[in-house]
Amino acid sequence: MDDLLSELVSKAGAMSDEELSSLMRQLEVLKSGREKQQERHEVAVDGRLAMPCPHCGSVSTMKYGKYRGTARYKCKDCGKTFTSTTGTMFYHSKLGVAEWKKLLEGMVLNRSNADIAQDLQISA
């Protein structure tokens, strides 16, 4: 990931202002599409909110406690447990969605890895 990030930042630094603006617009569209695709919204079922199961699609789910501060759910149909980020690029990430957003914004603005890391309070 660090190599890809460094390569992207160096290529973005060589772009004209017009090309950089175009890239920023394209990344914004990509980000917006991924957020819509990857966010799981609770849906109304029988007057209550339910988190759909990412494994089988069932809305017959229940809250199943928390793990390290993240809410867990269990599917009553397939029996599997999941979180709101299961099956997304954020599932195994130590960074949350908000931190990824800030990281991508820093990359698009051609900020150094050290500056981005400092803003996010993570190691570079």
Image: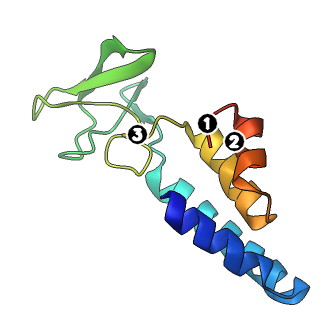
Query: What residue sits 36% from the left and 27% below the top?
Result: 46
Quadrant in which residue 18 is drawn: bottom right
Location of mark 2 (residue): 117
Q: Secondary structure at mark 1?
A: loop
Which of label 2 and label 3 is nearer to you?
A: 2
Query: What residue sits 45% from the left and 15% below the top?
Result: 69
- Residue 117 seen by the camera: yes
Q: Secondary structure at mark 2?
A: helix
Compare marks 1 and 3 and give the one earlier in the sequence. Answer: 3
Amino acid at circle 2: Ala
Question: How was this image coloured?
Answer: rainbow
Which residue is at the far top?
65
Q: Nearer the viewer, residue 119 or 88?
A: 119
Q: Nearer the viewer, residue 88 or 115?
A: 115
- Residue 123, numbered label: 1
Image quarter in which the C terminus is found = top right
Amino acid at circle 3: Thr
Location of mark 3 (residue): 85
Query: What residue sits 58% from the left and 63% below the top?
Result: 5
Q: Is residue 57 above or below residue 83?
A: below
Q: Position of residue 19 (x, y in %)?
A: 80, 87
Q: Residues within 10 Å of mark 2 (few under 14, many from 20)?
A: some
Amino acid at circle 1: Ser
Mark 1 touches mark 2? (CB < 8 Å): yes
